Image (tube, rainbow, N blue to C red):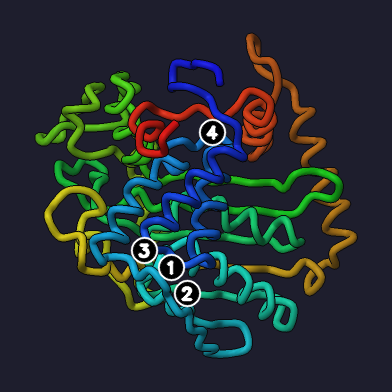
Amino acid sequence: MASTEQGARFPEALLEERVAGALRAAGASEASLGAATTAMLHASQVGVDSHGVRLTEHYCRMLGGGRLNKNPQLQVERRAAGSAIVHGDDGLGHYAMYHAVEVGMELARESGVAGVGVSHSSHLGAAGAYALAGAELGFVTFATTNTDSMVALFDGAERFHGTNPLAFGAPVPGQKPWLLDMATSSIPMNRVLLHRSLGLPLPEGVAADADGQTTTDADAAEMLLPLGGADYGHKGAGLAGVATLFSALLTGTTLDTDFIPMYGGDDIATPRNMGHFVLVIDPDKFVGRELFGLMITRYLASLRGARVRPGAERVLAPGDREWEEAASRAEKGIPIDPDTARFLGL
């Protein structure tokens, strides 16, 4: 165990054991807790600590309160050759979302492109976990969800969109997948909560107080700002609407402004009916898997070899930083904030 500014570091195997044990003790089925553990560990491995194992305590509380179904029975309704809806039965969102990727790959093998919506689900953690799941098996994969209002609109002074992530993954022969996982807010709200737990200030221009004024005080942050900040936040706000379009409107689930908040409030028994969406593309049904592999390999080599500006070391492709962080954490351990360490008995 080593100490870092984020907290003590622990080996992945120990965290996997403690997280799965906590969810099991809270009553989660083996299938759903396995999916949740995998998704949270992915986030912790690649440095997305706000969506990593620190969420275990929250999920356990929701399982205990009844908001989350401990033993969800997933149902799949195929709507057409390339479309389906997965009913999550109000269980852990990770379980429904991983299954949606599986359904999407099955349909895409036949139709080339498959869109799979998820209804009656819950918080899914890091959307990149699901884009990665498809990419690792050879499919170009897009994953998204909308969440409860916590991000101001451009020039707005109240919460409207959720952090609404967009995640894209693509297979690369002989390499880790190309992976882009981004919130459409400047940062996720879980990052604010993490900074509160660690007593650290926020970066400039990512959050606002109750009056819509920017703040670096994590305790005073009432809402997030959209990606792009004060000058270009219309881009982030527009992309947040894209997530809502796919995740809520196409699935008939819950709009950002209508969600029961993930945190706060006394109601931890009512399901939130979250919607998610996965788009899966089979390269074999387009240019062919072999040529696609040659093209993306060439593209990434060109990108990484691009000339850099003075003072910069190199250009990174989406996912490069995450895979380097994962390798470092595999060697040094995964940093865990004090509150999570106490909950997991570490």
Residue drawn at the location 17% of the way across and 48% of the way down = 264
Checking the image for residue 47, the label placed there is: 4
- Element assignment for label 2: strand
Q: Residue 117 — which label?
A: 2
Q: Nearer the viewer, mark 3 or mark 2?
A: 3
Residue 96 tag number: none
In the picture provided, is 170 more to the left or to the right than 166?
Answer: right
Residue at screen point 26% across, 69% down: 271
Q: Residue at x 58, y 37 (%)?
A: 46
Identify residue type, mark 4. Gly
| Mark 2 Cα-neighbour bin, 10 Å: few <14, some 14–19, many ≥20 | many
Q: Earlier in the sequence, mark 4 or mark 2?
A: 4
Of 10 and 4, the residue lying toward us: 10
Name the secondary structure under disc 4. loop
CB under 8 Å between callouts 2 and 1? yes
Secondary structure found at label 1: helix
Q: Nearer the viewer, residue 99 or 280?
A: 99
